[in-house]
Image: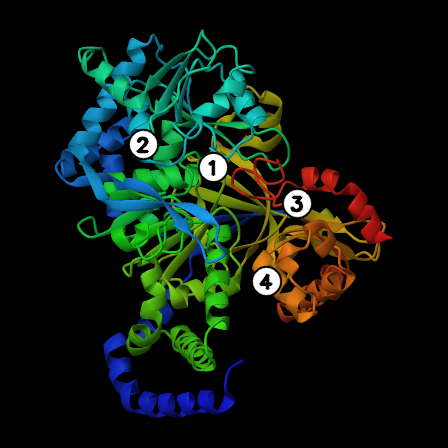
Amino acid sequence: MENAALLSAFNTLSFIYDVVTYPIYLILQQPWIKINKSNEMKSKVTNLDDNSILIQTLSEPSPGHLMIVKDKIDTLYKVFQYAVEHHRDSNCLGTRQILAEEDEIQKNGRIFKKYVMGEYQWMTYKEVDEASDHFGNGIISLGQKNKCNIAIYAETRREWMIAVQGCFKQNLPVVTLYATLGDDAIAHGINETEVTIVITSHNLLPKFKKILQLTPLVKTLIYMEDQLTETDTTDFKDSVEIISFKSLLQRGTSFSTLEKNFPATTDIAIIMYTSGSTGQPKGVNLTHRNLIATLKAFNDAISVDNGNDVFMGYLPLAHVFELLAELSCLFCGIRIGYSTPLTMIDSSSKIKRGTKGDARVLKPSIMTAVPLILDRVYKGINEKVSGGSTFQKTLFKFAFDYKKKWMERGFQTPLMNKLVFKKTGSLMGGRLRLILCGGAPLTPETHVLIKICLCDIVMQGYGLTETSSCGCAMSRDDRSIGRAGAPLTVNDFILTSWSEGGYTIHDKPYPRGEIIIGGENVSPGYYKNLEKTKEEYFEKDGKWWFKTGDIGLLELDGAIRIIDRKKDLVKLQGGEYVSLGKVESQLKTCPIIDNICIYGNSFKTHTIALIVPNRPHLLSMALELGIEDPKNIDPEELYTNKQLVKMVLDELTAYGQSNKLQRFEIPVALKICTEIWTPDNDLVTAAFKIKRREIYEKYKTDIENLYQ
């Protein structure tokens, strides 16, 4: 709890400071310029018919965009060749050395394996170009034919990017599979695309002892090596050849005279399997033309300094958002240093106590993020503050509110940044200036906290695999919170009424409806799934369009706010509509929640919740109730304790009310789940979006009991 007298003293001192410094900051920072830019119109609207409006950006193509058109850079092969020509001897891809693995004894006596890590080791653009040449040649020498699919099932790392560049050079479509997918989903993607060669990693190779029984066409596995441990290649199917990444590169040096098979702009570059939140993953065909369109749009959306900017790569490269972000960096000459959630920050689970995480060594200036990651940062900062002294909590509250107030007025707060927020910024190395966030809507609370504590510019965007991760994005000058921005320069939006859900373009003050995206970035359709393609894609006025199923709201300045999803809408018995996704996004930032699934029954008047708790927070609540030694109580017993369940529900209810959820949106009963939801148990997707159908099926009896 903050100290009221201390807070009053801070406010008094800041008032005096503001009176003295306001004229200076006003002249130096010219906040009205920022406010005017933020308020500029961002798109124009044209009525198509009684149920639809066309939304088009007012932004102009950037010099980078125009250069791509002028120089006819129309394939991803040409993108990297351009980068090599202009940044040949500059650092390109970096991997941090792992020197050793040591046992570390924890305070409770348990022993964890921790890494002893060194510096980042860099390859230049020239070296990456040569390595990708050798990789492509090595693949062709194995008998792989032009335009035949090859799969990558591996974690994000330098070799992933080298491999995909080698495939682009030989016009080999790459099937991307999330490293967190379950065995059945992996087998489905491999079998559907008739892959015979799979590129994987040391950590994932053992899974193929089972997967190979489900994938009879696979003849070759290529694995990326571990830095410390030799890979065990024994006890695999005898008919499958297993080759290390390094030995394939070596093999490729002997075939340097092989003819290159350069792709055409209409050729398939990637078959990207969606994370499958509504069933079996679907393969999305993405052509070079689609991905080049997004590359143009990304060039328009962000400004870079190729001499100083550093990008941290850690999100799955099997996701189109991360892949296009990294390709955009390479095109601009920005070096990419790879990391993992296990080693990213000083407190990450594999970092030895007292040593530096990747971020403090790499010092990135740009990174991508998804709301799940930023929500965890949000909770982490709040937990750290709540565990501090009264003085620290009071100082943080004052500094947070102070910076927020002046930030909303267009000012920067250099003194407060130096005294308070330099410490939170140092978590990511202290140089972070831009975070690109996509994958799902970001809650306003998390958006504000990240902007204040970590990085001034947090640009939220919206796109789908089916639109090559392109759609709309906040402009660099947009100072608003919780919006996805205006359509990007390579695509248009149609907003069409969805009367069943109660959203129409005639709604006041803001038109609302389903978002439909059209442009060069839109995929030609799903792999071997003509029926689904016909259902969700169509041609209109010479342009290819995709029906997203997402509900957007068009604000007065032409920016889009994502407010709902058609599949997430439930009508309760009283006639109220509940957007399950919206309620979940609000409640998942509650300190007690690690994950949440809301369920609504159309024959009932209220919703219920299934939650995965934040265990440390839950144990603290148990101690408050006088439950002795809750750590050693069987979770099945602890999590069903009626007093504890009620206490959790009360906290969730209060949190929902404070976030202005309606009475009927807040769950009136909940179950605390003992099992953590992961891709391995098929309760969340590889991108960690909840899988409603699977969760409902697993907890069917509990849901029925909660409604009773």
Q: Which residue is label 3 attached to?
A: 566
Measure how far apart labels 2 and 3 are at the Cα level: 36 Å
Residue at x-position 59% and y-position 56%? 615
Reading the chain from its start, which is encountered first: label 2 or label 3?
A: 2
Reading the chain from its start, which is encountered first: label 3 or label 4?
A: 3
Residue 201: image quadrant is top left
Badge 1: residue crowd in 10 Å (few <14, some 14–19, many ≥20): many
Decide: marks 2, 3 in contact (CB < 8 A)?
no
Residue 246, percent from left and from top: 26, 22
Reading the chain from its start, which is encountered first: label 1 or label 3?
A: 1
Relative to 535, say whether 423 is above or below: below
Residue at x-position 74% and y-position 56%? 670
Reading the chain from its start, which is encountered first: label 2 or label 1?
A: 2
Reading the chain from its start, which is encountered first: label 2 or label 4?
A: 2
Q: Which residue is label 1 attached to?
A: 467
Residue at x-position 28% and y-position 45%? 117
Q: Amino acid at mark 1?
A: Thr
Q: Which label lies toward us, 4 or 1?
A: 4
| SS state under label 4 | helix
Front residue of 120 and 13: 120
Decide: marks 4, 1 in contact (CB < 8 A)?
no
Q: Which label lies toward us, 2 or 3?
A: 2
Reading the chain from its start, which is encountered first: label 4 or label 1?
A: 1
The reply to whether residue 411 is in sight is no
| SS state under label 1 | helix
Relative to 627, say whether 324 is above or below: above
Decide: marks 2, 1 in contact (CB < 8 A)?
no
Q: Which residue is label 2 attached to?
A: 161
Relative to 221, say whether 698 is above or below: below
Q: Amino acid at mark 3?
A: Lys
